[in-house]
Image: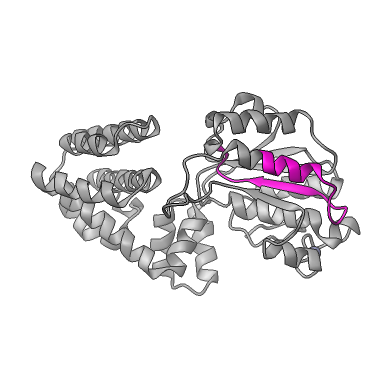
Amino acid sequence: MAKNTGLNWPIVGHQNIISYLEHCLLSGQLAHAYLFVGPSQIGKTKVADFFSQALICQNFSEKKKPLPCGLCPYCRQAQNHLHPDIFRVERELNDDSEKLKKNISIEQVRELQNKLNLRSFLDSFKIAIINQAQALSQEAANSLLKTLEEPAPKTILIILATHQHLLLQTIVSRCQVLKFLPVKNSDLVDYLIGQRIDRKKAKNLAALAFGRPGVAIDYLSDQSAYEELTSEIKQFISILQSDVISRFKIINELVVARDIDGLKKILFIWSKVIRDLLLIKNSLPNLISHAFIGGELTRVAEIFSPKTLMEIIKQLNLTRRYLDANLNPRLTFENLVLTF
Ligand SMILES: [Zn+2]
């Protein structure tokens, strides 16, 4: 939880960022645009939600605390994503499938600009939260740049992105950049224990989350996600131990069932498993992410040399880049498992 601030936002970690935003709110020295950079599920959206709620809260205009109050009609609207002056832009679902579109389109940015150009409903701030801004199409990014170049009064953009280098440099340079770092493991454990989780499970979840509170909270609230992760790890362990034909069969199932984001998630899980195997090899089993399956990992670690594991990590990183470059996912994954 944030400590030593007057805001008391229920957010795990990121104290320096919350203190900075508190200073912005209390001093009235607000930037026209903020860029929150950091991995998914680290807390960017949560901070953006509380920051925007603070800006439209009745307490803000009356210079009172706490901020946000959480009780006034505007706070309630914001909490329910119904506030007429807070706009959200994110990747939309494809019409014909449940998968997210690859890009945020220029039409979405234009629609946002039209809304920002209208007078505020409540004469309050108008706030745009742009999620996964790295997915803005080229035209959408260029169009957004115009809004940043000619900022309207009482309009604040909060742009969220996983990596700064995936955005136009001209966008980055017009934003106040705030970098979200992984939350300390002990902070996460304390938070989870505060949620009445027993210490052992809290430690397991925190290790899994890798500094990203959203991951721990997801696993906590969704037992099936925890089970899915376990089966994904076991599937990878079986790939590592099987022949090429069986590997290709599993890859076929994986590629059919997942979109690019899903496949990247698989690569992330696989990287963490290999990292665990390396830690076990280096006699550091207490640092592994998947302690709940530690016995099996210890057994698998015996099969591979540290050199081979380092090579697999390299290949996993390469595969991620190939997916970013839109290479055929099936071929990319088949090539990957040939190197194990
Ligand atoms: Zn309020």
Q: Position of residue 170 (x, y in %)?
A: 65, 24
Q: Nearest the camera: 166 or 214? A: 166
Locate the N terminus by quadrant.
bottom right
Total numbered labels placed on residues in the image: 0
Indicate left or right for 84 with 337 as reference. right
Would residue 127 be counted in the magenta stretch?
yes
Q: Nearest the camera: 295 or 150? A: 150
Q: Quadrant of ligand 1?
A: bottom right
Indicate left or right for 274 with 121 as reference. left
Q: Image point 22% across, 57% down: which residue?
A: 234
Q: Position of residue 162 (x, y in %)?
A: 52, 40
Question: Hey, which residue is sitting farthest right in the picture?
Answer: 62
Question: Hey, which residue is sitting farthest front in the picture?
Answer: 96
Asked if one can make out residue 86 in the rendered structure from this viewpoint, the answer is: yes
**Which colour assignment does the render follow?**
one colour
Locate the C terminus by quadrant.
top left
Q: Image point 68% across, 43% down: which residue?
A: 111
Q: Nearest the camera: 78 or 211? A: 78
Indicate left or right for 162 with 88 as reference. left
Q: Image point 22% across, 51% down: which residue?
A: 253
Q: Quadrant of residue 78?
A: bottom right
Would residue 38 be counted in the magenta stretch?
no
Asked if one can make out residue 243 in the rendered structure from this viewpoint, the answer is: no
**Where does the magenta region start and end?**
110-133
Q: Position of residue 243 (x, y in %)?
A: 8, 45
Q: Is residue 4 above or below residue 143?
A: below
Q: Is residue 311 above or below residue 261?
A: above
Q: Image point 79% across, 45% down: which residue?
A: 24
Q: Nearest the camera: 257 or 244? A: 257
